[in-house]
């Protein structure tokens, strides 16, 4: 028998109904939406004539499509103590995310070969609470692995222009423009236009601003400004210039820029987007929208990330670019926690050294309330914030389209997966390590008052998280994208 989900506030995100509805959603035994009831009258008629296996009434809580995060670092195998599949997907579920996509960089081995992908998927099955997809990695010397990785089911290929921080730097090094060009040529020959997405971390370092070369020269490595000076906006501008050159040479290839923090690089992207009809897309992160360099405390290495959190004055450019049709198409967490030792937050001489600390923010579970709170603060100051429709577009619909999931995820409509985020946009809470389900607990949001509490997360009709009852069974699935010259489909294992 079918399941029935009820709420007085349902946001469908189907492109037709922009207002909240008071109604219900009928879900079949396979976890697929069979029908949407658009009014209380339709609900009453259905209940009178049909017996359901279970009815879940969420009252005044807001029910919307489950969130999708295309930018998550799950460090298993190899660094499970940083973040593993169980902890990452629990955090995702508690944050309203029903699908996340794992970056290829921080596991050991990284996902730069089919063998690396199989190591990931074999560990993930049976322990994930939400659906998980994977990016493949491009590094020097693995061009011959791109086609096999795409054929094996990765969502796309991801690379970095600036490499990785120790201890990952030797396993996932940077690519240069020549290697990026060769990779794009390979993709053009071997993949159809809608397949083979290339995602880039676009910071281009120069000898003057490499952290490792400046550490001995810095007098105050425990102050954030010392680290910030090593990664100026010019690195992102140079990186964006390189990416835009490649996007102009390959106008039909989808290129996606991760972790945009500097507003100075946005005009370059806008000009290229107009030329290649939107095939160049950009993504920013909650921390760039909500945190400012001015507030980072001494030794506060939990704030360190690449690119860095910049000054408050820079944020306005990012917020403007989030509007429909703006340069930035989506928000991803870039969730990348690490152990206290790697983050230089333990006792000892190296404590609080920004130049030695791992760059990454623990943010997956808190992404929705962080963005929603920052938006509300802007509205209170007379600036334009985000509507519920904007949240859905930036944190659900656009990520689904990027990763090829939009035919069965990202909206509440007949035939789609019954993936729901159930939350209270008005309820507030104080963020703290005791609330986090991640493997490590350090986060720059600790002690902050945030608005937006997730009460339940549903994946294909199954409750994987309930606020006061904890977690259900780990019934998330591995998402593998199967590509060919003629067909793109998904296999859910």
Image: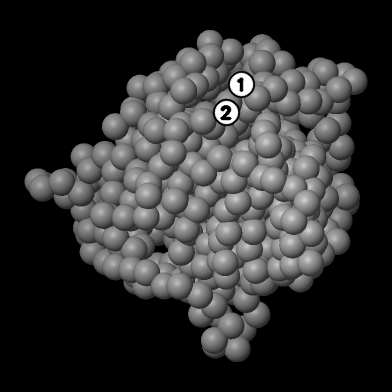
- Residue at the image point whose x is 51% and y is 30% from the top: 475
Q: In terms of depth relative to the viewer, which is nearer, 53 or 320?
A: 53
Vertical order, 231 against 383 (above or below): above
Q: In terms of depth relative to the viewer, which is nearer, 421 or 291?
A: 421
Q: Earlier in the sequence, mark 2 or mark 1?
A: 2
Task: Say left or right for 415 vs 141.
Answer: right
* Residue 80, image x, y percentages: 33, 28
Mark 1 neighbour class, 10 Å CA radius: few under 14, some 14 to 19, many 20 or more: few
* Residue 155, image x, y percentages: 67, 30
- Residue at the image point whose x is 53% and y is 37% from the top: 130
- Residue at the image point whose x is 37% and y is 50% from the top: 469
SS class, disc 2: loop
Q: Which numbered circle lies on residue 493?
A: 1
**Please, which colouring scheme is shown?**
one colour
Task: Say left or right for 73 vs 337.
Answer: right
* Residue 190, image x, y percentages: 81, 18
Which residue carries the number 2 mark? 477
* Residue 132, image x, y percentages: 56, 32
Is any atom of residue 260 visible in this view? no
Instruction: Point out the image quarter for the C terminus.
Output: top right
Question: Disc 2 vs disc 1: Cβ atoms closer than 8 Å?
Answer: yes
Q: In terms of depth relative to the viewer, which is nearer, 210 or 120?
A: 120
Using the rendered view, name the quadrant where residue 168 is placed. top left
Vertical order, 146 against 337 (above or below): above
């Amino acid at each position: 028998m079918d399941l029935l989900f009820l709420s007085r506030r349902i946001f469908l995100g189907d492109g037709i109904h922009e207002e909240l509805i008071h109604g219900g959603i009928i879900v079949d035994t396979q976890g697929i939406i069979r029908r949407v009831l658009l009014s209380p009258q339709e609900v009453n008629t259905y209940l009178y004539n049909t017996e359901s296996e279970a009815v879940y009434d969420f009252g005044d809580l807001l029910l919307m499509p489950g969130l999708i995060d295309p930018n998550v670092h799950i460090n298993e195998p190899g660094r499970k103590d940083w973040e593993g599949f169980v902890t990452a997907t629990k955090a995702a579920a508690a944050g309203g995310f029903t699908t996340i996509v794992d970056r290829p960089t921080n596991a050991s081995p990284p996902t730069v070969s089919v063998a690396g992908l199989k190591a990931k998927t074999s560990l993930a099955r049976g322990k994930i609470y939400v659906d998980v997809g994977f990016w493949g990695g491009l590094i020097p010397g693995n061009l011959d692995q791109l086609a096999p990785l795409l054929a094996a089911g990765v969502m796309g290929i991801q690379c970095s222009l600036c490499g990785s921080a120790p201890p990952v730097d030797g396993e996932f090094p940077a690519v240069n423009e020549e290697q990026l060009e060769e990779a794009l040529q390979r993709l053009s020959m071997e993949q159809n236009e809608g397949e083979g997405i290339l995602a880039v971390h676009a910071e281009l370092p120069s000898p003057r601003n490499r952290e490792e070369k400046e550490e001995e020269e810095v007098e105050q490595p425990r102050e954030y400004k010392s680290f910030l000076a090593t990664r100026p906006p010019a690195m992102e501008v140079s990186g964006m210039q390189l990416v835009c050159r490649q996007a102009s040479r390959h106008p039909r290839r989808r290129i996606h820029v991760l972790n945009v923090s500097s507003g100075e690089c946005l005009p370059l992207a806008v000009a290229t987007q107009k030329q290649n009809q939107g095939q160049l897309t950009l993504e920013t992160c909650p921390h760039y929208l909500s945190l400012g360099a001015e507030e980072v405390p001494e030794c506060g290495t939990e704030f360190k990330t690449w690119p860095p959190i910049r000054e408050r004055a820079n944020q306005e450019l990012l917020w403007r670019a989030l509007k429909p049709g703006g340069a930035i198409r989506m928000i991803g967490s870039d969730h990348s926690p690490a152990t206290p030792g790697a983050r230089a937050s333990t006792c000892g001489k190296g404590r609080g050294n920004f130049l030695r600390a791992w760059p990454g923010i623990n943010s997956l579970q808190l992404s929705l309330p962080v963005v929603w709170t920052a938006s509300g603060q802007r509205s209170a100051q007379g600036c334009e914030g985000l509507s519920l429709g904007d949240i859905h577009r930036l944190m659900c619909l656009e990520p689904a389209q990027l990763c090829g999931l939009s035919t069965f995820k990202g909206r509440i409509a007949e035939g789609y997966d019954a993936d729901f985020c159930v939350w209270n946009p008005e309820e507030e809470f104080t963020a703290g390590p005791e609330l986090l389900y991640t493997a490590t607990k350090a986060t720059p949001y600790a002690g902050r008052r945030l608005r937006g509490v997730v009460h339940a997360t549903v994946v294909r009709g199954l409750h994987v998280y309930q606020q006061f009852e904890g977690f259900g069974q780990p019934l998330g699935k591995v998402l593998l994208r199967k590509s060919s010259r003629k067909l793109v489909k998904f296999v859910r294992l």
